[in-house]
Image: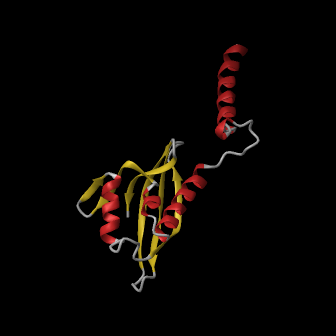
Amino acid sequence: MRLRLFLPVAVVFTTLAAHAAPLPRGGHSGRIKPVPAETEIRATLDSTSSGWNKGDLSQYLSAYVPTATEMGPDGPRGGVERIELTMRNGFWKTGRPLQQLRYEHVEVRMLGKEAALVTGQFVLTGGGRPDRTGWFTTVWTRTKQGWRMIHDHS
């Protein structure tokens, strides 16, 4: 009788223990604290605005997987090349960004361990133009290169 109770309890505690102590990154001995996914996603998102603001469109685009989609006026469009074309035609007409970019009200919602939903507001300022703002929703996945966007609805 005790064995029948012990086995399920042992399985539950083993499972809880495995999930309570995340494995260290990079095979280190456990002295390095793992970076939470939300921190990595926010850092990648920050790198997009940094790249944008210094005129480095490739840095901005590096946050997308090659097969990423964006929501356009006629529905979803695929490929990072299409996203680049959208940026060049709408926001980079001179070969540089027309305005500076920043993000506000960013929320990261984890969808398990390998995906996240990120919402927030983009703000474009400067360049002698009126400020432009809008809300975005992006879907992220964990890749070998880190967290990357697979869909952008801006």
Colour mapping: secondary structure
Locate residue 24, reporting x and y percent.
68, 39
Q: In which quarter of the image is the N terminus?
A: top right
- Residue 98 position by quadrant: bottom left
Residue shown at the point (73%, 15%) measured from the top left: 2
| Circle count | 0
Residue shown at the point (62%, 49%) measured from the top left: 36
Viewer-proximal residue among 18 and 94: 94
Report the residue that reaches farthest toward the left. Answer: 74
Residue shown at the point (66%, 32%) measured from the top left: 18
Residue shown at the point (38%, 57%) measured from the top left: 152
Does residue 53 lie above or below 126 as drawn? above
Report the residue that reaches farthest toward the right. Answer: 31
Viewer-proximal residue among 89 and 1: 89
Locate residue 123, reporting x and y percent.
46, 74
Viewer-proximal residue among 51 and 148: 51
Does residue 78 lie above or below 5 as drawn? below
- Residue 76 position by quadrant: bottom left
Locate residue 115, reporting x and y percent.
48, 46
Report the residue that reaches farthest toward the front. Answer: 95
Compared across the picture, whether 72 is left or right of 28 comes to left
Locate residue 30, reporting x and y percent.
74, 38
Compared across the picture, whether 94 is left or right of 50 comes to left
Does residue 45 lie above or below 54 as drawn? above
Q: Quadrant of the C terminus?
A: bottom left
